[in-house]
Image (cartoon, rainbow, N blue to C red):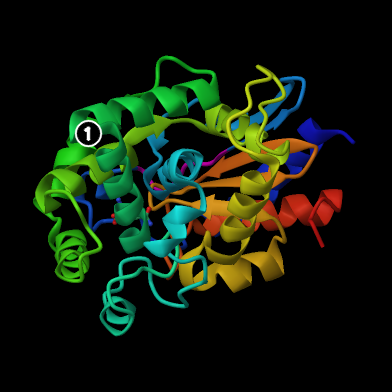
Amino acid sequence: MDYQQILEEIEIEIQPLFGQGKVADYIPALGDVDADQFGMSITLFDGTQFNVGDADKLFSIQSISKVFTFTLALKYLGSELYKRVGREPSGNPFNSLIQLEYENGIPRNPFINAGAIVITDTLITHYKNDTKAFDEILLFIKSIAGDKSINIDSVVASSEMEHAYRNLALTNLMKSFGNIKNDAISLVQTYFNHCALQMNTQTLSRAMLYLANHGIDPISNKAYITKSQAKRINAVMLTCGHYDASGDFAFKVGVSGKSGVGGGIVAVIPQKMGICVWSPALNEQGNSLIGTKALELFTTKTGLSIF
Ligand code: GLN
């Protein structure tokens, strides 16, 4: 298959969609990003890469970081983790408080904000303090992505901290139920810090290879997690990776994927490749509008959906 040709066709076909959707302005620093950008990358198991558009441009990975923190927490806690966070789709927006009250402070899954905050809390406990936890998360992502230069956009991180009302509310509500063990403020700051990491579609597509290959990175041969853990992360990405649009993403695209409000989406094609697409304008559910369309075009043209 001529993947380069397919990416170039997609880049042309998404052009009419520029102008639709909206960048995430609830984080003021993200509101300043130019919406009319698009990049897409594929990385194969031997490291061969195909790119189109703004594939080398750094963007805020936001909730894509939740894939890596979930992986790290599973690695250290195993299935104990599921006592504190579930694995069912929420059917609610990513930052919703409603279900948490009904369900006694146990978030539905690791990809909604509440679930990701619990995961970060377990990592702070595991590594003994917030600074060490963030350093280890960053080292882990650098290793998975094969890129030592990954760093935090501190303007985005502090902009999020200044408008942290909802995430602090989620954290405090969970703490009232006993499901948060560490200090709420430093926990939320650590969560924002990993959301504010900057990467591009090239490195993120490469970072998905361990999930396409049963937990083992086919380039470095490092085994990050077990085969069964990799299967489960992919399952949770498929069912919960796009919040209340996860069903729609499975319906239209048909692969495991995870979005972030920075406009990135990562996707996994089992035994074949990692994919990342980026375009900052979001749909109603907070997922990249053009990114979703580009992935739909990709699985339609290649037949590489899992269904
Ligand atoms: N840091 C963002 C938040 O907490 C992540 C949300 C997202 O990417 N969906 O709101």
Q: In the image, what residue occupies the spot 51% across and 54% down?
A: 79
Location of residue 23 (image quadrant): bottom left
Q: Which residues are magenta?
A: 34-39
Q: Is residue 278 left or right of residue 60?
A: right
Look at the image and tell me in which quarter the C terminus lies.
bottom right
Q: Is residue 208 magenta?
A: no
Is residue 154 in view from this perspective?
Answer: yes
Judge from the rendering whether residue 138 lies leftward or rightward of residue 26; answer left or right: right
Q: Residue at x 28, y 81 (%)?
A: 98
Mark 1 surroundings within 10 Å by alpha-carbon count, few (fewer than 14), some (14 through 19), many (20 or more): few
Residue 35 counted in the magenta span:
yes
Q: Quick check: which quadrant has ligand 1?
A: bottom left
Residue 87 in the image, given as x and y percentages of width and height: 51, 65
Q: Which residue is mark 1?
A: 128
**Can residue 8 be seen in the rendering of this structure?**
no
Mark 1 residue type: Lys
Extreme residue in the right direction? 1
**Where does residue 90 sit, x and y in percent of width and height?**
45, 74
User: Which of the pair 53/262 is nearer the observer?
Assistant: 262
The quadrant the N terminus occupies is top right
Q: Residue furthest front?
A: 80
Helix, strand or loop for disc 1: loop
Figure label count: 1
Magenta segment's dominant SS is loop
Seen from the viewer's position, the closer of residues 177 and 274 is 177
Reply above or below: 7 against 57.
below
Q: Residue at x 53, y 25 (%)?
A: 145
Give 48 or 292, whichever is nearer the viewer: 48
Residue 31 at what x, y percent from top left? 26, 50
Residue 164, placed above or below residue 108: above
Is the C-beta of the residue carrying label 1 under 8 Å from the nearest atom of ligand 1?
Answer: no
Residue 104: percent from left, percent from top: 28, 77
